[in-house]
Each structure stands twice: as structure tokens, then as C-alpha cells.
Image (tube, helix red, strand yellow):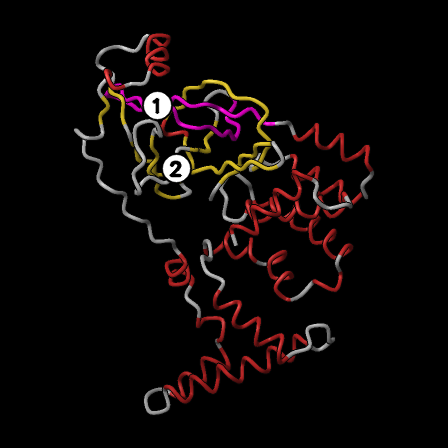
Amino acid sequence: MQKAIIMSGLVWQEAFCTSNDYNALMCGLYYSFMCQANMMCDSTSLNKLLAKVYQLHATLEPDSITIKYHSFYNHISSHELQYGRKHTSEVFEREHKNLMKSVNHQSTNCEQSIIIRYFSVLYSYVTKTFRYVCAQKCETLLLDKAQELACKEEIFEALKQTKERLPILNSQTNIINIECLIPFHVEIVKHLKLGRDVKFLKRCKVSSSFGNFVFSAPSYCGAKTTVSNLICYTDPLTKSLTFGQIEMIVDNGTCKHLIVKEFILEPMTEIMKSVRRQGISRIAYEVLKQCQSLPPFIGKATDQIQSIVPLENVMCPAIKLEINDATYVLMSK
């Protein structure tokens, strides 16, 4: 799934489709996936985006719209808002496969067919299971109080992501002696005028709304328990979404900072100008405009600068890809 999301973003950035409308569709799909269960995108903006992408999708590929796409565009975001993120699609995929085999999804009475088929299956299952215990009671619940069978709190707890334990970082072996710093990093230390009480670390832990991660300074650590040295973070000044590659991890005793090579991204406004010159439909342009108002989850790197990032600003790992002599960085969530 992640590979498909990344590919849709790259297709949009590289304009691999001969039609700009299809490139816009890839852009809309990429942002639609990235905004799901993402606290950086509010529900109103997400619903606007999903509505426009749905309209563009139905215009370009009407025969490809199935129950699965309908559920994605119209129901997944509201489900996550109410109950939390659904981390597996196995159940949905299985039921969707059964539906497509047994119900003509383009027929006018498909909703009635689905309700009759699945209610009868559920009713039969419950009555057989509890035949000797509480068949009559379950039958009453199914017929009169079907909506009360689902407990909201239990559903929410079942869909919660279990947090992975972070590895223990040994305080002694995790410290880099200043004599072991490479010459380039020694120059950075001198330029920043860092005191003798500052410690330089090989790895650091990060806990954010996206999960738990361990990042490392690649010049000093390549442990298997390290997620990445590429990070996605909020800029301390502009609060915008930014990408960088860790150079050093600095601990002054009270807080930790990362010295990173920050990627300067090509503004989406430049891509929009190029697209308009080449020609694009109104609904496709509206999709791109909506994506432009969202955080840049992917971008083409045009330059790099040195930057200092507080550890609490780090959100999640990032990915760097090189295609056709161009470097792209994107969020890995």
C-alpha cells in the first residue's frame, strides 16, 4: 500500500501521465491518502479534497468506481474521526470480494440486496451460536435494537494502534567523544560556539502523534534498531512542514537539538504555473488548488541549508528518492 501511495506522488511530481488531468488525479489521490488520520489536516479540508478528487475520478474513469472507492471517498474519514484509525483492510477486502461476486454493484437495488444478504447471515450466525443460551434475547436485540449491538468504546479500543516499545539507549555507549567528531562537524561546533558541557549523541528517541521512532546521526551510528536519519519536522519559525537529514544530535542537559541539512523544496505554485500553461480541466485544477492549501507531504529538493531543529519538533521519518537526476523527499507515515 505504501509503495502505491509513493508512486502516485512521484507520478504527479514527474508528470508521467500524458494528460495533466490524470497527473492531477494522482496528486489528489496522494494527498487524500496522506491526510487520512493525519492531525496536520483538519476534517473540513480533507472532506473538500475527497469530494473534488471523487468528482475528478468519476469524470476520468467512471467504470473504475466501485464500492471500495465509494467507501474511501465518503466514509473512511468520518469513521476515523469518530472511532480512530482502522489499521487493517483485511476484513474490508474479504467482504468486498464477496460483495463483488454476489451482488451487481451497478444494479439499482444493490443496497437492498446487501442488507438482506448480510442481515440474514448475521441473524443465522447469532441464533445458532447462542441457541442453547440466549437465542430469544439475541433475536430481540437483532430485530429491535440492532444499533445498540456495537459499543462505541469497545470499537475505539479495538482500533487503537498498539505502541511499539522503544529500545533502551545506553547512556555511555550512545555518547560521542568530541575527539571522534569528523572535521566538518568540528567546524559546526566551533561556529555555533557550543560549550564543553554539551554532549553529542549517536541516537535519539522521538515520540509523536505519528508513533515512536529512533533516529541516528549516520556518520556515527548505523544500528538496525534505527528507523532513519531522514526526518520530517515542523520548522521552529514558520511552523511549516519541513524535511531534513540529521548531521548531529546535541544534548545540552535540558533539551536535545538536531543539526540537520534542511531540504529546500520547489514551491507548488511553480508547478501550478507550468500545469496551467500546458492545459488542464477546471475540476482537475480545483483538485490541485485544494492540495496546494495542504502541507507539502512531498516535494522536489532544489537546495540544502544547515538548520537547528528542537527534538520535540520532529514528527516522523522521511524518504529520499532520486529519479531522473532529481531528488524528492516525502513523509513516511
Name the spot of residue 16 as percent of width and height, x first: 70, 44
Q: In the image, what residue occupies the spot 73% across and 76% down?
A: 107
Q: At numbered mark 1, what does the secondary structure look like: helix, strand or loop?
A: strand
Q: In the image, what residue occupies the spot 38% across and 53% down?
A: 161
For residue 46, say whether it is visible.
Answer: no
Name the spot of residue 291 as percent of width and height, x first: 65, 39
The reply to whether the magenta stretch includes residue 49 is no
Could you say which disc has been placed on residue 248 in the image? 1
For residue 182, say whether it is visible.
Answer: yes
The secondary structure that dominates the magenta segment is: strand
Could you say which disc has been placed on residue 303 in the image? none
- Give 267 or 208, whichever is nearer the viewer: 267
| 186 left or right of 156 in image | left
Query: Which residues are drawn in magenta?
Result: 238-265
Q: In the image, what residue occupies the spot 55% across and 45% down?
A: 34
Is 287 drawn above or below residue 139 in the view shown? above
In space, the residues marked 2 and 1 are separated at their CA atoms by: 13 Å
The reply to whether the magenta stretch includes residue 243 is yes
Q: Indicate the amino acid at tag 2.
A: Ser
